[in-house]
Amino acid sequence: MRFLLFFIIGFCINFSSNAQSDDEKMLQAIYNEALSNSKCYNWLDYLSNTIGSRLSGSSAADKAVGYTKKELDELGLDRVFLQEVMVPHWVRGEKEKAYFENKGKITEVPICALGSSVATPKNGLKAAIVEVQGIDEMIALGTEKIKGKIVFFNRPMTPIHIRTFEAYRGCIDQRSSGAREASKLGALGVIVRSMNLRLDDFPHTGNTNYGDLPNDMHIPAAAISTNGANLLSQALRDNPNLQFFFKQSCEMLPDVLSHNVVGEIKGTENPNEYIVVGGHLDSWDLGDGSHDDGAGVVQSMEILSILKRLGYKPKRTIRVVLFMNEENGNRGGLKYAELAEKNKENHIFAMESDAGGFSPRGFSLEADSSNFNKIKDWKRLFEPYLIHVFVEGHAGVDINPLQSKHIVKAGLQPDSQRYFDYHHAANDTFDAVNKRELELGAATMTSLLYLMDKYGIE
Ligand SMILES: [Zn+2]
């Protein structure tokens, strides 16, 4: 009898550990497919190496719209269409120049104009420079110490954060609001330490925002490489009166017409419940935007491609949206949300990949507690793929304007240790993206999307 009991228990344990649930089987099929037959790396190759950087309003951004629409057309989706959106058109102009002059010695430093910045006067701007660790310190110094000078914002990213976006968020006000606040104190321009945890010679751009300051108060703003920032800071300790020079010829042109690209598989049971996945098609102009956000674009396209190849018929309507103009306006994200509301489309789930094409670790989720707990319960399904991060937090800039009642949002969280080595800089290029890591991200997103489609939201 005892022997029989052991036998039965042993059989049950053995059976339960070997039998795969339908969901486990589906996730395995998704990962197998993504790692064997993915198209996303080739798409990224074309976007990066044939089209190149895709700043809003540029002809390359237009080419990227045409190319991705054509590729989506070839996937045999139910519908592929464009959404018109007017976008800002900022151009960098000539390559920027900068140096500091200390006791007759000139030291050149690498800079780049911040997006949306105005130009310096034609022959450049030369003035004394004041280093601060942030906007508060500058305000404490007051007009008397700032007026007629260039402000140097030099607060570095804090190295102790394992999730490096936290370090980024701790510095970004210097780039986004530094010029505006410095102008109010009479500064002539600003130089901002690049948001990069590594010491190197790449200046990292990104948008600056003058808010409602009148045009005549817009002052030029540039980023300086981390090595350049350290050199300048050291020289200022030696000579606080040294002169800094920079020259840039960037310009804001009138808005132009561009597009979001949308592809769709119609739902078989609840076609008016929409699930959206996307990344942004525009990029900054210094590299080719392979990590930011070519990776997110091709991963999002790959999700629909995997579902088609596996013959999966979604219950709900699945859309891929390639948003235009995340970097300097978010007009594409706003337009998509506006049209979704106008067309009374009930969006239940939106997912974005905009944190680089590195090894996926999990998701940052915006959900009420019942949906958050439900998703967390799926964590064990992801464990074989080394996916373990399911945290509450910001999901994505492009999907942020979508505001359906109970919508759940997710942002893919890849490992972020190297992201800021490349973010918004000239080295954000195709060779910095690893094919398998890119594919694993696509598989991870497809898996969560499959589970959300199958089980819906609470
Ligand atoms: Zn991005």
Image: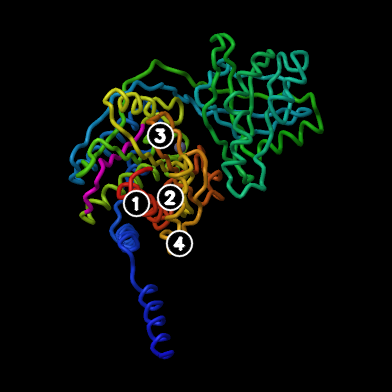
Q: Which residue is mark 4?
A: 383
Identify the residue at image location x=34%, y=51%: 451
Quarter holding the N terminus? bottom left
Where is residue 402? Give x, y as percent. Answer: 39, 30
Q: Earlier in the sequence, mark 4 or mark 3?
A: 4
Q: Which residue is mark 1?
A: 451
Q: What range is drawn magenta here?
A: 312-323
**Magenta span includes 129:** no
Q: Which residue is mark 2?
A: 375
Instruction: Give 121 or 147, whichever is nearer the viewer.
Output: 147
The CA span between labels 1 and 4 is 15 Å
Q: Residues within 10 Å of mark 2 (few under 14, many from 20)?
A: some
Side of 129 where 336 appears, left or right: left
Identify the residue at image location x=55%, y=43%: 420
The CA span between labels 4 and 3 is 27 Å
The amino acid type of the residue labelled 3 equals Ile
Q: Could you say whether the residue bearing mark 4 is in a helix, strand or loop?
A: helix
Q: Earlier in the sequence, mark 2 or mark 1?
A: 2
Q: Which residue is mark 3?
A: 399
Give the number of the disc on residue 246: none
Q: Residues within 10 Å of mark 3 (few under 14, many from 20)?
A: many
The reply to whether callout 4 and callout 3 are in contact (CB within 8 Å) is no
The reply to whether callout 2 and callout 1 are in contact (CB within 8 Å) is yes
